[in-house]
Every structure is written in structure tokens, then in C-alpha cells.
Image: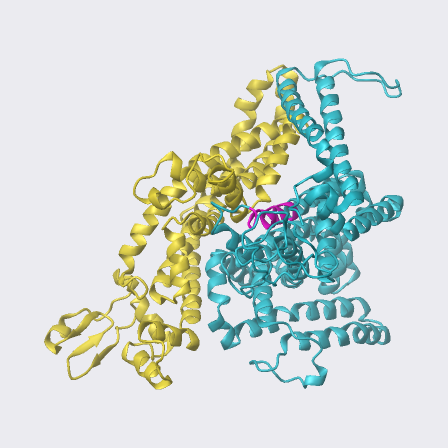
Chain colours: A cyan, B yellow
Amino acid sequence: MDPLSWTGQIAFLNPVLALGLGLLGLSVLAWIGLSSLLPENRAITPSGAGLSLPTGPRELSGLVVRLAFLLTAAVIAAYLVLGLALGTGAGIIGAIAQRLLPVWIALVLLFALSIRFKQRLGLYGKLFDSPIGMIGFGLVMFWVFTGIFGAFDLIITHDPLAQLSGLKNKVPGTPLPRPEDGDFQWYLLGGDNLARDVFSRMVKGAWEVVKIAPLATLFAFMAGITLGLPAGYFGGRIDTILSFLANLILAFPVILLFYLLVTPEIVQTGLPQYMAAVLFAFPLIFFTVLINARFRTQPQQNRLWLSVVLIPLVWGYFSLINQTGSKINFLPQSLDLFNIPGGILVVFVSVVFVNSPTVFRIVRGLTMDIKTRDYVAAAQTRGERPWYIMLWEVLPNARGPLIVDFCLRIGYTTILLGTLGFFGLGLPPESPDWGSTINEGRKLLAIYLHPALPPAFALLSLVLGLNLLADGLREESMKD
Amino acid sequence: MGLFILRRSGVMILTALCLTFIVFILTNLEPNLEKLAKTQGNFRMSDEAVNSWLNNNGYGQPTVVKYGQWLGALPGWTRTTEEGVTGRCITGTQPEAEAGQAARFCGILQGEWGYSTRFKDDVASIISVRLGNTGYLMLWVLVIMVPSALIIGVLAGMREGSVTDRSLSTVSILTTATPEYVSGVILIAIFTSSTVGLKWFKGTATSAMENPTFENFFLPVLTIALYGMGYIARMTRASMTEVMTAQYIRTARLKGVSFHNIVLKHALRNALIAPFTVIMLQFPWLLNGVVIVETLFNYKGFGWILVEAAGNNDIELLLAISVVSVVVVLVTQLISDIGYVYLNPRIRIS
């Protein structure tokens, strides 16, 4: 087999792309320059005057930027479509586009359905009115689908842990020296310094992030909300104590905390498990209080809802913290639903622990603001209990900023996970997560670029997507 | 104001005590001490040998007592053997007469920071050398980061929704989405790689410790500055847009003051109050960045000793590091609070 080049048969597109990118760069510069030098055009154009060609240099440069952007986007789409059709014939890009086929299908379906029904989808539907939000959402969902399909072994070309001799530090597109039947013939993004496939490791790394980051952020939000609401609503001593504790955790340098919590010695003492037992109890408390506050006066419904929600939650909670052969081990084997590998649990706990004080501060601030509103006073006059007001009056009205912060915080959690991987903490050494891969790749960065750059760009694009998504959501929720 | 500072300082000391106590407990957990004994003694020690090593070196006492000794609130331990007396405040083994002259208390209250088991040196001297290296790095980071972030933020917030705003906001979102270990790797790949890169800079900053030059020092500084810059720029932009919609700006515009003058004379001073606190609160994050960048560029500063001390469970060095970082965090918080009150007349007068 011959080595693959980057573009293969579709190399004729390269000059077009170069032209498009050059034009885009130049026109953006001209646009910025012109719009900062020329005076603002404050003339009021009557609405319904019909289409007219832009006249001034400002408008003209804006038009050129738009056209150049469209050209570039069209060329990139052409790369993908031709790559899908030609596969390895279109070089590495084609092969990767073809491997990612399930992701493209899922993305197209998701976007088509969402745009079709966007009127009925509330804030989520409005996201599709803002181009920034759509780009961000697209980037995020790309990695989410890549992670999920990667977990089902649909995308990866090789086992991410398998080492094939002769492929150590080989450049992208190197063919396997002795391929067997049914093997994929190339290392698409080359091999790392242990001769493993960089592309497959990157795809598997997406799954590591997708499975930990949103869930950890969710737990941090549960803890932050459960503690932040009473601190903001009641104030006084409870607020002083909780705020002091939150500031205490925030004053800790994150990396020092990680180094102290995420070592094999600390795992031996069972400390992370005790912390897990505390931190994962917050969702239980949250849902109990939530339901009880709502149905307190209707005991029958109260009992029904509580049992429907709490029984699976409590069972899940016990299975989560219970682990055979460790400090917390009381559940019989048959009842233990799942086991979390020790390393993952520690990482999970420490990320939740670091994130929850910030969420606490945000919720506390929002609650202090919202509790002065009239509808809270109305509820108080009605004689509602404090917890009902907090969870059913204050919390729903604080949802806008919280949703935006949730997106940003998933991005931050992704960065934290990368940091943990970068310092080789917690996750097993051969784990394909992006932080560990970057750390391994950086050691030979002066000679071989390809092992470190794909995970770096993957992490960058995911976090960028989350930031753009948060920006889009913020913009759209402000419009109400 | 005096009472405010006094109260904040009290809370600060309490926080520092709590934090160092937590670090103390975590580093003095059973398995950690065992690891320490094995790295200091030898790796094949039996459990009894480990225990006797720990007892002989004062680690066998209750944690609270050890913490008191480290703090200097309790007298340091001593142990009399046939050869003489050893103890926390005594170097090596000394005859009884000389040992009697040694200080009874030796904790950080007395200015004794202890002895590093990893570097075999005095903690105070290690910290001062390494902190100097990192301080120099931080100085240049601030010199680059703060002015550029403020300029970007002010330019973007000057005309909300304009082309400049949108392009500069995109840049600042991009930099906040790039953690140091990603931007560092990309910058190294672009500027230093010997195969395809530009070879403008050096990929390590090891030589920068003695002789910092533009060539070996610029990339680490840029890497830290980029990540913090986006956040400060976004906060400045938000503050600037808020000021630009204020009543007095509209009045000035209607009076016919030129846009140039409005921005420089009327808006800027009020718009820079919020970023001041943001910059101050950015210090704890810079500390994170320093650890990553020092590892990435092999620059032996404060972050490097943090990694070394934590990796080897060097208890006293770790405690000193946490004291320094906690003090940095809390002092910057205090400055940001005081500065906010001082800069903002509306709060100062009420």
C-alpha cells in the first residue's frame, strides 16, 4: 500500500481553498480598517425599500467578507462531500471524512429536525436564530457524536491501545507494514511514540470527555444549587459559614488540590470515596426537597412521586459509592449495579469538588437578587414555605444565567480534565484522554508534531464550541 | 475602612490556618508517611522499620501536635538516644549540653520554614530562589497581558455590535477557550519545531533562568498571557459597553463632544473600575498557568517545585508552597476589595 497524501485526488481544490482563505483574510482586514476609519453611517433606510446594491466602501467590504466566507465554506464542504464519496482516494481528509460518516448523518438529522421544529422548542429552538450559537452547537455536537459513536467502535480504525511495530512516530497516512485481512490499511494521523494510532486515540479521547465532563458539571450544579439557595435566601449565619467554606476551597490553588487528592496513596485511604458519598448525596437531597416542597399538602401524590424518583436514585447512589475491596463496601454484590474504576471516581470527585463553590457563589448571588422581587413577596404573603419559594419561585427564574454558566462550566471542566491528564494524575497512564495524549506528545514536539496536535485542536474546538454556544444562548435569552 | 481591613485580615488568617491544616492532614495520612519513609530510608523497609523511622523522625506524634510544632505554637519534639539529642529544632544529633541551647519553638511563627526532604535544603531558601524566577515570569506576563487586554476590551466595547467589536470578541473567546497546555503546544509547534516550524524561538526556557532573552523567554510569557487576556478583555468590554449606554455619555454626545474625547475623557475612567478587580482576581488562575507553563517549558520556578514537592510528598515544602499561594490569593482579594471601594466613589461615600 502506498502512503496517503493529505488530499489525494481532490488536490485540485487546494488552490481554491488557498484563494478563498486569502481573500477572506484580506477582506476581513479591509473591513475592520474601513469601518474603524470611516465615519458611521447613521442614515435611516426606510423599511421595505427593496433590495439595492451596497454603495459605500463600508457596505462593499462587508459584502466581500460575506462572499469570501461563503466561498471558503463551500470549498470546505466540497472537501467533505468529495472525501465522503472517494474515501481513501481523496487522501487522509477523504478517509477521515468517510470514517466520520455516522457523525455527519447524526449532525444533519439533528440540525434538520431542530430547524424544522424550532418554533416549538423554546430557548433551544431560538438558538438556531443566532449564527454564533449554531456554530458553537455544531462544534459541541460534533464531538459529542464522535465520542458516542467512538465508544461503539464505529469510527476508530484501530484499537487505541494496540501497538503495531514499525509505526512508531510515523507521519500521517503511513500504511501498515504487514496488514492482516480486515485491518484498516493506514494510520490516518500517524503513530505516537508507542506506535499507537493517533486518530483512534483522539476519537476515544472524545468519549472520555463526553462521559465525564457534563455529568461532573451536573453534580457540581446540584451541590451548588442545594447550598446556594438557602445561603442566598436566608442569609445570616448559614450564609457566613457556607460562604467561608466556599472561599476556602476557592483559595486553594487547583493544581495543588489535585496533587493532594489524586494520588494512589490518598485513594488507598478511601478519602475520595467519602467525598463521593457526600457530594453525590446532593442530588438526592435536591430532589427530595423539590418534590416534598411541591406536594407537601397532598400526601398521596407526595409519596408516589418521592418513591418513583428516589428509589432508582438511591439505588444508583449506593451502587456508585459502593465498591468491593475498598473502604465503603456494604452492598451485596448482586445489588451493586455498576462499578466505577477507582481512577475515574477520584477524577470525577475532584472536578466536582473544585467546581461546586463557584456554582454556589453564582446561585447565592442570583438568589439574593431575585428574592427582592414582587412575586417572591407574593408567595411569602400567600404563606408558602421557604423551600417552596426557593425551588419553585426563585430557581426557575434564575435558569437563564444558570444555563449559560452550565455551558461555560462544561468547557472549564474539560480544561480541568485535560490538566489532570497533562500532569498524569488519576487517569490510567495508557488512557487515550486528550490531556494525557498532549502530555506524551509534547516530549517529542521538536521532532514529531503529529502526536500532540490532533488532541490539542480537538480540545480547543470543543471548548471553543461550548463558549460560542454559551454566547449564543446568552444573546437569545436576553432578547426576551 | 480601618475596621473593614481589620476584619478582612482576620478572615484571611483564619482561612490560611484552615487551609494549611487541611494540607497538613492530607500530607500526614498514613500511606503518604509510609511513602515518605520509604523514599527517605529504602524501598524495601518492613512495616516495623517504617514505623520506627517515622517515630524516630517525629512523624509518629498526633497530627494536631505536629501541626502545632510546624506552626511554632508548641515546642518542637526532642528524642534522647545514647549518642545525644535529636529534635525538630536541632540539626543532626548533638550532645545534651549543646542541644539544651537550641530554641524550644521552631515553627513558621519563629521564621523557621523547615527542611525539604526532596531537595535536602532549607525550605526558605528554596522558596525564595524559585519564587524569584516565577516573579520575573509573572512580571512580564502582566506587562504583556494587562495593557493588551484593556486595549482590546475598550476598543471592542466602544461601539457595541460594530465590526471591530465582533472581530475582537471572537479573538478573546478564542483565547479563553485555549488552555495553556494547548496554546503552549501549538506555539511550540509553530515557532520552534526543527522540522517544519519557523525556528524563531526556543522550545525550552531552561536557559532563561540565568539569562532571559526574547528568544527563550517570550513563548512562556505569551502562553500564560494569552489565556488570561481573553477573560479580562471580555470583562473590560462588558464594563465599557455598560458605561457607553449611560446617561452622561448620551448627554456628552448630544452636546457635540467628539467621539474621541467621549471615550478618553468621559468613559474610560469609569469603565476601568470593574477590570481592576477582575485583574486582581485573576492571580489565582495565573498560578495554575505558571505550573503548567513551567512544566511545559522546563522553567524551574514556583510551579516546578510544587510539582516536585507534591510528587515526593515533601511535607514542609508543600506547606510552605500552600502558605505562599494562599497568601497571594487572599492578599489580591483584599487589594481588589479595597481598590474597588477606593476607585468607586459611589461606594466610598455611602
Which residue is at the front of the view, A292 or B174? B174
Q: Residue at x 29, y 60 (%)?
A: B123
* Quarter where residue A465 is shown: top right
- Residue B29: x and y in percent read 43, 75
- Residue at the extreme left: B97
In magenta stretch: residue A186: no
Is B91 on the left-hand or right-hand side of B146? left
Residue A474: quadrant of the picture: top right
Percent x, y for residue A280?
64, 69
Residue A383 falls in image quadrant: bottom right
Residue A219 higher or lower than A268, as above or below: above
Residue closest to the eye, A370 or A64: A64
Magenta span: chief secondary structure: helix
In the rendered image, residue B56, in percent from the top left (x then y), is placed at 27, 80
Name the residue nearer the viewer: B197 or B288.
Answer: B197
Query: Magenta includes A458?
Result: yes
**Is B225 left or right of A96, judged from the image as shown?**
left
Give the magenta part as a residue range. A450-462
Write the residue at 55% across / 81% down.
A327
Q: State whether residue B350 appears in this view.
A: no
Horizontal side of A234 relative to A75 (left or right) equals left
In the rendered view, tell whether residue B233 sits above or below residue A463.
above
Residue at position x 69%, y 48% from top? A404
Q: Is residue B48 visible?
A: yes
Relative vertical location of residue B172 with respect to residue A205 in this rendering, above or below: above
Q: Nearer the viewer, residue A422 or A412?
A: A422
Q: Position of residue A384 (x, y in %)?
A: 77, 63
